[in-house]
Amino acid sequence: MVDIRGDTLQSDGWTLVLTDAGACASPSDLSPSAGLIPAPVPGTVAEALEKAGLFDREHPHPLNDRDGWYLCRLVDVNAGDAVLRLEGLATLCEVFLNSQKILVSESMFETHDLAVHLHGGDELALCFRALEPGLGEPGPRARWRPQMITPQGLRLVRTTLLGHMPGWCPEIQAVGPRRPVSLLRPHKPIIRDLSLRSDLLEDGEGRLYASLSIEGYVSEVTLRCGEIEQAFERDSHGHCKAILKVPGVTPWWPRTHGRPHLHEVTLIIDDVEHPLGRAGFRRLAIDRGADGRDFGLLVNGERIFCRGAVWTTADIVRLPGGRDDYEPWLRLAAEADMNMVRIGGTMAYETPVFFRLCDEFGLLVWQDFMFANFDYHYLRELYGFESDRLRREDPDLYLALSQAVTGEVAEECYAEWRRQGSGCNGALVWTLQDLLPGPGWGVIDSTGEPKPIWVSAAPRLSARAGAFHRRRH
């Protein structure tokens, strides 16, 4: 659900108490004399303990061996129906409203919208269960074991690997409501599934593709970019689409090749304006070179040499997502004449603020899907659900991947793997986070459906084609 009327952030009045793993089944089991400390939300257990003088980031102690209870009394919230939005719970979390369990979440990357009825003065509790007890339990046999990550049981959990890579980053585990907790009061019309995508045609025309769903009566929905407006077309099911065209638009460029121009975008519903942020118009393509064997990135028709760094987090204790947290680091990247940052698959998804800042600074973003390094057993069920799960975990970060482009990347990787004298020893292949090793290798294409990558891989693996064809069946 898209909140265009404003929501109420539940960021004040939270307290935290730690208990032994599994000691309390519900908030009513907590001892009245438990040592409660103030807790920032959004935030982490490490942050709350650090503010209370109970945690030293230079000499961290484990945080995933105890249960962490976040408690809040909704004293200033009126009674009535509402939607409780939880944008990021790290990681195994049980949600209680007035001591009644209303959610069990097992992914720190998933957003939840829960319909609730409030009575006034309600008690909200978030219990983050200890990860450690379950990490030693046996799971499906893994076909390989990465050495940089401990323990291996993390392959069974949808959480960031930050804090679990000894020698690579501090051993500070992500625990807590790392993203906002808010209450929405849905009133008609309700907007859902809002999607915006920009493009730049070769003739210089910018296009903004928009779609959304509406529940409730509205007479007119309009998209505006700059001074140009385009009405949405609505079908009988409430689905709306619009294509806004901007002739001769000033394009967005990486900072190394021009100015990152951005244009204000507004959604207008029955004459009420709802700012959607800013959009840049640019065109991406792959340059194969004169001999068809090259691989380069073209932005707006110009070949770009991408240079940059891997992004980890602005603060491993807090795992923040605000402008003030991101801006100093991204500004340094821009001032160093970088034009790309990569969010690797061992990290965590950042907030939309991160991407807005990258737009402003002229930084391209290479975003990995947060499946990295492990042989994740549930990826073998990709063809059953994973394309939908991509969008459910964070629709704002779902990338419409091109099968053709991903296939070209795979082809080049395999060519390098097989090249005589290559020193990559296959490592280059496994850095492709969008390819799933083993039976069922595939990619998610722009339709959101899994597609086989065998066609792209076959030209470089012709010597093994027979074995591959047998495995396809």
Image (spheres, grey):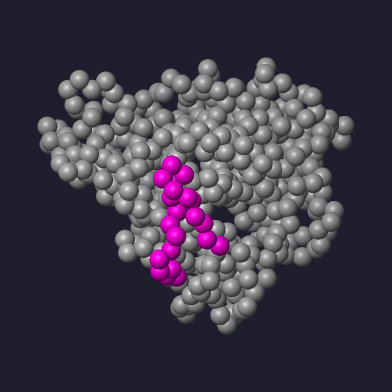
Query: Which residue in the rendered view is the most extreme toward the bottom?
Result: 219
Q: Nearer the viewer, residue 339 or 439?
A: 339
Left or right? Give the position of 464 relative to 245.
left
Left or right? Give the position of 465 relative to 323.
left
In this rendering, the answer to whether 171 lies above or below 329 is above
- The question of residue 246 being in magenta is answered with yes
- The question of residue 130 being in magenta is answered with no
In this rendering, the answer to whether 298 lies above or below 308 is below
Q: Nearer the viewer, residue 464 or 358?
A: 358
Asked if residue 398 shows in the view, the reply is: no
Residue drawn at the location 45% of the way across and 54% of the way down: 252
Residue 40 is drawn in which quadrant? Answer: top right
Q: Position of residue 263 (x, y in %)?
A: 52, 61
Q: Nearer the viewer, residue 271 or 303?
A: 303
Quarter of the rendering occupied by the C terminus: top left
Mostly what secondary structure, the magenta segment?
A: loop
Query: Which residue in the rendered view is the most extreme toward the right?
Result: 33
Residue 466 is drawn in which quadrant? Answer: top left
* Residue span colored magenta: 244-264
